Image (cartoon, grey):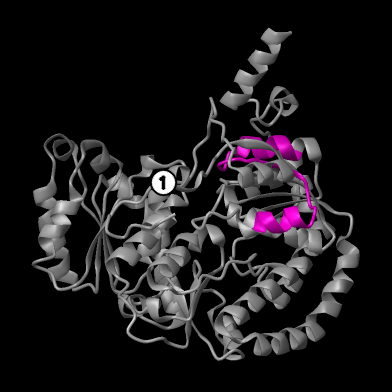
């Protein structure tokens, strides 16, 4: 669908690409309904807390060097990105660069929510600019400002005349979407509409959207083989770098959920090709991704040479470890950008996926296609039970109790902890590059082996921890609290 950078607002993932937070079925059913367009999500009559889109969006912007993020809302809302703000400082130090980025909350109070506070907001923007001299200012709304209809766009338009750096309105009301990944789109929209400039010349660069550039040096070395310079977005990016990303030869990302909006936006507005393929996890993913980059940038010959060299080093080692992994059973709980990619990698390693939980699911991406990870699994006749869980740990525990897998893998630390308390060996896939390419796929396989060879910690903890879940819950279907399921059950009962 068309991306309108003339507007400061972004349609939610639910409305834009049909994303859902509730589903129980299997992979084949999920993919087929995505393809034909009749996939419908379910609401829950009971729900635990999930992640706020505001945190996802503003943490992305706060990771840019030497900018100011002004969060117009109560102090509690402004705390939402505090941990990420600190982590970005750590990553800048690790890379050896300095950043003077500031994260400012306007501390709205009861009076402000009744009478409005746009005058105060204008003063704060001007003072932040005077005091910190940022390279750009991002002014974000919050749930409170969204509810009272605070007009941050007019304030931003007004101060632009007095400030000589980009000032961008960011509509990040947490309640606007149940899909926390909408926050990533909001941050991308702010960059596309307020920072990126039209191209003046093509550069020998490739845009690489990731979270924390932890494999920065390694990726730079890889791309040297193809005569390409990666620009990492957004952690430790500068406004100067971001203004020129329209001049790159292509855009790629570590995770389709994270980079889909930016990649499609740059392609649609400036003609920068977006690399659409399964991601770099595992051998098949890494090689498919590299070959697509080679095709898009005209470097296929160099890519094939690199693949041949690396396969000779790593494939024999990976094949040897696969012998010990074959027959293991696993449950996965991650964001959709990783759930259906990591399940593919486990399949490559000979591990059976008995259930996969995605924290949400995007029916189709911006270009109208089903996510590449889902297409791959369907085309290769890979099927398993699947659900869309929205980080509902009680659903994870129900599945773990029923299936008793050898292993649980998650990109959410909270659910990993609960799995261990249940006595299940768990691997927290924290680093986005944990399964990247040949080298890290080998390390990932070794990590799994380490986890299953010694389970004493999980077993001892399970004996000493009393979980809050009753036998009643463990006997229920995982969709017991889905509103749609209840309605369907009622119709069946009435029919009988």
Residue 452 location in percent, x, y? Answer: 81, 57
Report the front residue among 151 and 328.
151
Asked where in the image residue 430 lies, by quadrant, the reply is bottom right
Residue 269 location in percent, x, y? Answer: 38, 68
Residue 170 location in percent, x, y? Answer: 29, 55
Residue depicted at 43% across the width and 73% down the height:
271
Q: Which residues are magenta?
A: 373-400
Q: Is residue 22 above or below residue 183?
A: above
The answer to whether 466 appears left or right of 218 in the picture is: right
The answer to whether 352 appears left or right of 205 in the picture is: right
Task: Label 1: state its secondary structure.
Answer: loop
115 falls in the magenta region: no
Residue depicted at 30% across the width and 75% down the height:
197
The answer to whether 19 appears left or right of 145 in the picture is: right
384 falls in the magenta region: yes
Counting every numbered tag in the picture gives 1
**Quadrant holding the N terminus:** bottom left
Residue 122 location in percent, x, y? Answer: 12, 56
Q: Is residue 262 above or below residue 419?
A: below
The answer to whether residue 435 of the structure is visible from this angle is yes
Report the front residue among 235 and 207.
207
Asked where in the image residue 435 lies, by quadrant, the reply is bottom right
* Residue wearing tag 1: 12
Residue depicted at 76% across the width and 88% down the height:
309
Asked where in the image residue 389 lies, by quadrant, the reply is top right
The answer to whether residue 428 of the structure is visible from this angle is no
């Amino acid at each position: 669908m068309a991306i309108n950078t003339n507007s400061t607002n972004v349609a939610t993932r639910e409305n834009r690409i049909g994303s859902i937070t509730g589903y129980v079925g299997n992979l084949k059913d999920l993919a087929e309904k995505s393809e034909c367009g009749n996939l419908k999500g379910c609401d829950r009559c009971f729900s635990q807390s999930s992640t706020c889109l505001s945190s996802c969006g503003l943490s992305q912007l706060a990771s840019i060097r030497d900018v100011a993020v002004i969060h117009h809302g109560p102090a509690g809302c402004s705390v939402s990105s505090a941990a990420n703000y600190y982590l970005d400082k750590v990553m800048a130090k690790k890379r050896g660069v300095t950043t003077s980025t500031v994260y400012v909350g306007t501390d709205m109070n009861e009076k402000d929510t009744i009478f409005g506070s746009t005058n105060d907001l204008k003063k704060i923007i001007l003072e932040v600019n005077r005091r910190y001299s940022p390279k750009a200012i991002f002014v974000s709304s919050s749930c409170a400002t969204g509810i009272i209809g605070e007009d941050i766009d007019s304030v931003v338009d007004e101060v632009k005349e007095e400030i000589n750096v980009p000032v961008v309105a960011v509509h990040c009301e947490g309640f606007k979407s149940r899909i926390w990944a909408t926050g990533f789109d909001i941050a991308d929209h702010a960059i596309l509409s307020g920072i990126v400039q039209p191209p003046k010349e093509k550069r020998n660069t490739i845009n690489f959207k990731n979270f924390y550039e932890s494999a920065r040096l390694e990726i730079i070395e890889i791309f040297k083989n193809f005569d390409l310079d990666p620009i990492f977005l957004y952690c430790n990016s500068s406004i100067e770098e971001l203004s020129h990303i329209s001049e790159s030869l292509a855009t790629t990302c570590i995770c389709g959920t994270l980079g889909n909006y930016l990649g499609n936006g740059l392609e649609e507005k400036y003609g920068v090709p977006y690399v659409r393929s399964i991601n770099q996890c595992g051998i098949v993913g890494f090689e498919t991704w590299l070959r697509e980059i080679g095709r898009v940038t005209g470097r296929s010959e160099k890519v094939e040479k690199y693949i041949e060299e690396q396969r000779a080093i790593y494939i024999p080692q990976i094949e040897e470890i696969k012998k010990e992994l074959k027959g293991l059973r696993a449950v996965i709980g991650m964001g959709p950008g990783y759930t259906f990619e990591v399940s593919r990698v486990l399949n490559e390693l000979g591990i059976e996926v008995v259930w996969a939980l995605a924290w949400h699911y995007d029916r189709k991406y911006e270009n109208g296609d089903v996510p590449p990870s889902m297409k791959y699994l369907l085309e290769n006749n890979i099927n398993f039970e699947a659900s869309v869980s929205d980080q509902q740990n009680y659903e994870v525990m129900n599945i773990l109790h029923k299936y008793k897998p050898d292993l649980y893998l998650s990109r959410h630390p909270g659910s990993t902890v609960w799995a261990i308390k249940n006595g299940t060996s768990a691997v927290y896939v924290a680093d986005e590059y944990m399964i990247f390419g040949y080298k890290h796929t080998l390390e990932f396989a070794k990590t799994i082996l380490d986890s299953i060879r010694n389970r004493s910690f999980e077993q001892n903890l399970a004996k000493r921890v009393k979980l809050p879940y009753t036998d009643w819950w463990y006997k229920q279907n995982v969709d017991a609290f889905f509103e749609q399921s209840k309605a369907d059950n009622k119709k069946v009962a009435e029919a009988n």
